[in-house]
Amino acid sequence: MKAMTYNKYGGTEVLKQAVTPIPKVAPGSVLIRVKAAGVNPVDWKIMGGGLDGIMDVNFPVIPGWDVAGVVEAVGFDTPEFKVGDEVFSYGRRDTVKGGTFAELVALPASIVTHKPSNLSWVQAAALPLTGLTAQRTLDALGLLAGSTLLIHNGSGSVGRSCIQLAVTDGVRVIATASAKNHARLRELGAEPVDYGTGLVDRVRALAPDGVDAVADFIGGVLDDSLAALKDGGRHASIADRTVLSHGGQYIWVRPGTGELERLSLLVEDGTLSVDVAQTFPLQEAASAFEASMSGHGSGKIVLTEFSD
């Protein structure tokens, strides 16, 4: 099958198209013919060796964790799915090896669920990791209706999902973004503010007593987070482990069908929408990584065109 692979750590120069064996379908797993695969910063951070201290990497690697596609085959004892089912998944496993940037990927049924019917393939592939991250962050913060939440990087994919989920729960959201993204964040229900120097003053102008919680989706903002919080406020980060030394929580998402099904219901009832900024054909995965690395996107990046 056609796949993107790399044989050593490095930048985008190590990522090549290759022909690889079709994955075996173990008991309790499904083989998915990939229609689209989401690109996440963690994909190129792993490729650069950034997670070598916590995850085993077996070369050659097919990168990618997010996927949407059609069930091609099922293993023994997999009653949840049948051939032809439309599914999606956050396909992270404990070992980095056979990912979603390929024509076919085999995943445990326990981390796969049926695709929401009102999402395109591209949108479905864009949702899993970002949506699960936003959901898990809000669960960790435990906010009540009427609370005020500051989101760092509200215009990123995780930030956009978090805004929608928080607003649905009756939470007031203040979100940082560049001016070009303010209009979209207002549409989602947030009060946008510019990031950078003077941020705390801008947040305090909107919430003089401070915010009840902070969700950091960018890193490097711990001092601003602490200064914006009211006494007893809670904060969490997906990008800065030092929050643990300051009473915060560090968020790392676990794959699982149950949490994906929660997201599916929110998509199906219109609560949660998915913004896709760019798509690239599979063979241009290096360009997709470069676009992700630039940090200037206004939505998710997704790979398409997996079959000739």
Image: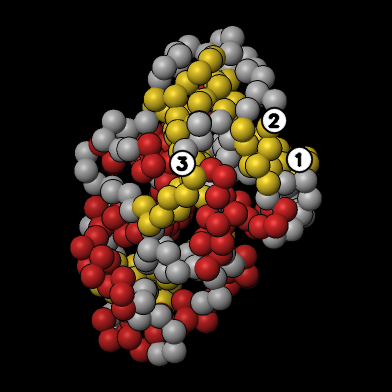
Q: Earlier in the sequence, mark 2 or mark 3?
A: 2
Q: Amino acid at mark 2?
A: Thr
Instruction: State the residue at coordinates (20%, 63%).
Output: 187
Q: Amino acid at mark 3?
A: Thr
Q: Is residue 143 visible?
A: no
Q: Is residue 256 above or below residue 152?
A: above
88 and 208: which is toward the camera: 88
- Determine contact: label 2, label 1, CB under 8 Å: yes
Instruction: State the residue at coordinates (29%, 30%).
Output: 117
Q: Which residue is mark 2?
A: 20
Q: Secondary structure at mark 3?
A: strand
Residue 105 appears at what percent x and percent y?
Answer: 58, 29
123 and 145: which is toward the camera: 123
Q: Which residue is mark 1?
A: 60
Q: Is residue 65 left or right of residue 88?
A: right
Q: Which residue is mark 3?
A: 304
Residue 11 appears at what percent x and percent y?
Answer: 69, 60
